[in-house]
Image (spheres, grey):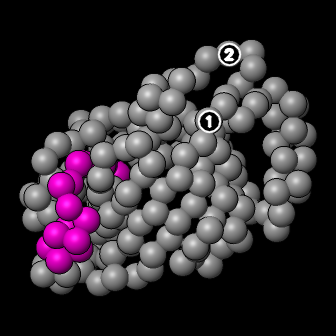
């Protein structure tokens, strides 16, 4: 599945547009993302990151603490992700112990940010309308093809496609 993110002007307008084209509201969510960086090397946050997600409001059938280490492959205006680690935890101490052990105490929490959003399903596409701390209002589209993403961006009145990953953008503005 391909994914791409774009800037929107208004969350409520975007919700109306997705519902107008037949999108179905699935759930709302909110969480804090804590991004970990290796101590011994630099990583390109556009293509790789280690994230501990701490859900405040979770509409998914997952635990409220989720560690993800992913590598993204960019092509055209979209990306696909390869998960190296995805693990759920009951508590923060358990998550931190796993991170220390799995990464041999070689990563540190570097920065964090809060986001909330609304997930919709529109045909085969998943649409995530999001308000991210210190980030422009945006929508992320997951779909089977680049043309499906482009069509959805057009329908939702996306003003600009974003090539930076959210962690890459946040690292740049929070440092």
- Residue 53 - label: none
Estimate the x, y position of residue 151 in percent, counting from the top left: 12, 60
Q: Check the image and report above or below for 103 versus 55.
A: above
Q: Give the side of residue 92 with respect to residue 12, left or right.
A: right
Residue 168 in the image: state x and y as whole percent.
Answer: 46, 31
Q: Quadrant of residue 39?
A: top right
Q: How many labels does the image show?
A: 2
Q: Does the magenta stretch include residue 114?
A: no
Q: In this view, does 139 lie to the left or right of 148?
A: right
x%, y% of residue 86? 67, 54
Placement of 4 over or under 22, stated as above or below:
above
Which corner quadrant of the image does residue 75 belong to? top left
Residue shown at the point (58%, 22%) measured from the top left: 43
Quadrant, the N terminus: bottom left
Residue interval drawn in magenta: 1-18
The reply to whether the magenta stretch includes residue 13 is: yes
Residue drawn at (15%, 63%) of the image:
156
Residue found 53% across the figure and 53% down from its top: 114
Q: Is residue 45 shown to the viewer in this render?
A: no
What is the secondary structure assignment of the residue under circle 1? strand
Side (left or right) of 165 relative to 104: left
Residue indicated by mark 2: 41
Question: Picture coordinates of residue 161 (x, y %)?
Answer: 21, 42
**Crowding near pointer 1: few (<14 within 10 Å), some, many (20+)?**
some
Element assignment for label 2: loop
User: Is the C-beta separation of discs 2 and 1 under 8 Å?
Assistant: no
Residue drawn at the location 25% of the way across and 65% of the way down: 11
Compared with residue 57, is residue 52 higher up or lower down, i.e. above or below?
Answer: above
Name the residue tied to disc 1: 111
């Amino acid at each position: 599945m391909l994914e791409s993110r774009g800037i929107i002007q208004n969350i409520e307008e975007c919700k109306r547009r997705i519902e107008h084209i037949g999108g179905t509201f699935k759930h709302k969510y909110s969480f804090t993302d804590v991004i970990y960086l290796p101590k011994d090397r630099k990583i390109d946050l556009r293509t790789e990151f280690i994230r501990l997600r701490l859900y405040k409001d979770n509409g998914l059938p997952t635990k409220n603490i989720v560690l993800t280490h992913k590598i993204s492959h960019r092509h055209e205006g979209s990306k696909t992700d390869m998960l190296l680690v995805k693990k759920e935890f009951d508590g923060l101490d358990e998550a931190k112990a796993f991170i220390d052990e799995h990464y041999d105490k070689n990563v540190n929490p570097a920065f964090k940010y809060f986001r909330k959003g609304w997930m919709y399903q529109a045909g085969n596409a998943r649409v995530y309308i999001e308000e991210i701390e210190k980030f422009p209002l945006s929508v992320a589209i997951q779909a089977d093809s680049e043309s499906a993403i482009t069509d959805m961006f057009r329908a939702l009145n996306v003003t600009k496609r974003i090539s930076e990953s959210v962690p890459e953008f946040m690292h740049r503005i929070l440092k």
